[in-house]
Image (cartoon, rainbow, N blue to C red):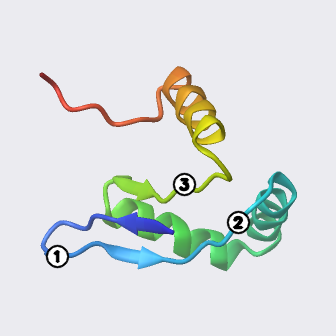
């Protein structure tokens, strides 16, 4: 799931993604490239939300989930509240 936080709305707009492996993710990206209207629509959604969104991440076990979180952190993709 992806949740988009749009100013003026009390609840985020949610979109089901249901991508479970890298091949599915690549197919999604390929479809965006081959369908300019779909890509523009998604870009509008990101602009509306000022690119503020969250993803629901699932893993088969805690160790795998921790590895995913570590990788996202290394890439600077995690939001961290200031202390």
CA distance for labels 1 and 2: 27 Å
Q: Residue 23 bears which disc, if any?
A: none
Which percent across, then down, holds residue 39?
Answer: 64, 69
Q: From the viewer's side, name the closer residue of 52 and 50.
A: 52
- Residue depicted at 34% across the width and 53% down the height: 52
49 sits to left or right of 66: left
**Tag 1–tag 3 contact (CB < 8 Å):** no
Q: Residue 9 bears which disc, if any?
A: 1
- Residue depicted at 64% across the width and 52% down the height: 59
78 sits to left or right of 16: left
Q: Secondary structure at mark 3?
A: loop
65 sits to left or right of 55: right
Q: Secondary structure at mark 2?
A: loop
Which percent across, then down, holds residue 44?
Answer: 45, 69
> Mark 1 or 2, which is nearer the eye?
2
CA distance for labels 2 and 3: 10 Å
Q: Secondary structure at mark 1?
A: loop
**Mark earlier in primary sequence (1, 3):** 1
In which quarter of the view is residue 45 placed?
bottom left
Q: Residue 57 bears which disc, if any?
A: 3
83 sits to left or right of 56: left
Which percent across, then down, holds residue 56?
Answer: 49, 59
Which percent across, then down, holds residue 73?
Answer: 49, 26
Q: From the viewer's side, name the closer residue of 35 and 60.
A: 60
> Mark 2 or 3, which is nearer the eye?
3
Residue matched to label 2: 19
């Amino acid at each position: 799931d992806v949740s988009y936080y749009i100013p003026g709305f009390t609840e985020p707009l949610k979109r089901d993604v249901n991508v479970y492996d890298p091949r599915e993710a690549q197919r999604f990206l390929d479809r965006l490239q081959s369908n300019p209207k779909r890509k523009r629509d998604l870009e509008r959604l990101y602009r509306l939300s000022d690119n503020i969104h969250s993803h629901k991440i699932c893993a088969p076990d805690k160790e795998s989930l921790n590895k995913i979180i570590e990788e996202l952190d290394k890439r600077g993709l995690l939001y961290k509240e200031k202390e």
